[in-house]
Amino acid sequence: MLLALWPARWSRSQRSNATLVAALVLMALVLSLLGWLLSFFPEPIGSNAALFADGALTTLYLTLISGACGLALGTAAALARTSRLAWLRHVASFYIWAIRGTPLLVQILFVYFALPVLVPGLNLPDFAAAVVALGLNVGAYNAEAIRAGLLAVPRGQTEAARALGLGNAHVFFDVVFPQAFKIALPPLVSNFVALLKDSSLAYAIGVVELTNVGNRIQSATFQPVATLSTVAITYLILTTLVTQVTHAVEYRFDVEGRAK
């Protein structure tokens, strides 16, 4: 959508940079004006516009932080799954199997309530517990996406790099991983957008994110249609903005890949 805004004479690199900046500016602008826009809505939305805006920001922060943790964890798990060390492969496989085979809500409740019992003294605040659970969850899915990208890189690329005299570290970080990450980027983007919606489950442990705000307001006003419709519309706005940013990131990586 944003790509069509730029002059055709611009290079692909210029268009990609402009698209990414425009997507980030648009997101910041909409989020900053969200409370003001909702204040014009009829009751019970108008008087609670600031609460909805704060809940939307909490949802976004929760998604960004847990998404970053999930990307790092997924990369580590993918490397472990493709390692020559059998025990590393088994540990990573067990992690992915356990996380993908259990509900996210159970994982959130486990981290918040059960983990302090297993590890005395480890009492995580509600937001931190939600970040840990969401990061662990999305990390398992990211691991499989990145592993698929690693396996999709032709073996000839590695052999050619080694024939040029590159060491193992240079072969991996300069040749294999950039190509694998580019291949894995579309499913990683899908996982991130899904994470934004899955973050609504953090309400179960008291995180005051968007769903929690809507639930509290509808419980106090007994107007579920208006309140939950506003929550759904706000989520739709957030996912649309995040999708625009992620599409710009995809386009940017594609430009860099072609430039090389």
Image: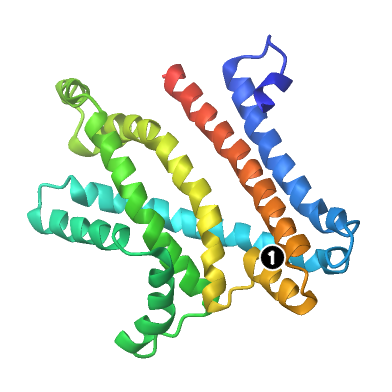
| 132 with respect to 165 (left or right) | right
Q: 10 Å neighbourhood of mark 1: few (<14), some, or many (≥20)?
A: many
Give the camera-side residue of 260 and 239: 239
Instruction: Name the side, left or right, on which 192 lies relative to 33.
Output: left
Tag 1: amino acid? Gly
Residue 244 % position (x, y): 62, 36
Indicate the quadrant where residue 146 lies. top left
Quadrant of the rendering where the N terminus is positioned = top right
Look at the image and tell me in which quarter the C terminus lies. Answer: top left
Residue for point 19% across, 34% down: 167
Side (left or right) of 2 relative to 152: right
Q: Residue at x 34, y 29 (%)?
A: 179
How many marks can you see? 1
Tell me the quarter of the picture where residue 47 sits: bottom right
Question: Which residue is labeled 1 in the image?
Answer: 55
In the image, residue 109 sits, relative to residue 226, either above or below, namely below
User: x, y percentage for residue 109?
Assistant: 43, 76
21 vs 131: above or below: above
Q: Name which residue lies at 67% across and 71% down.
A: 215
In the rendered image of this protein, does residue 257 appear above or below residue 31? above
Residue found at the far top of this picture: 9
**Residue drawn at point x = 15 percent, y = 57 percent:** 88
- Left or right for 71, reference 94: right
Q: Secondary structure at mark 1?
A: helix
- Do we see residue 244 in this rendering? yes
| Residue 132 x %, y % | 43, 68
Q: Position of residue 234 (x, y in %)?
A: 70, 53
User: Residue 115 falls in which quadrant of the image?
Assistant: bottom left
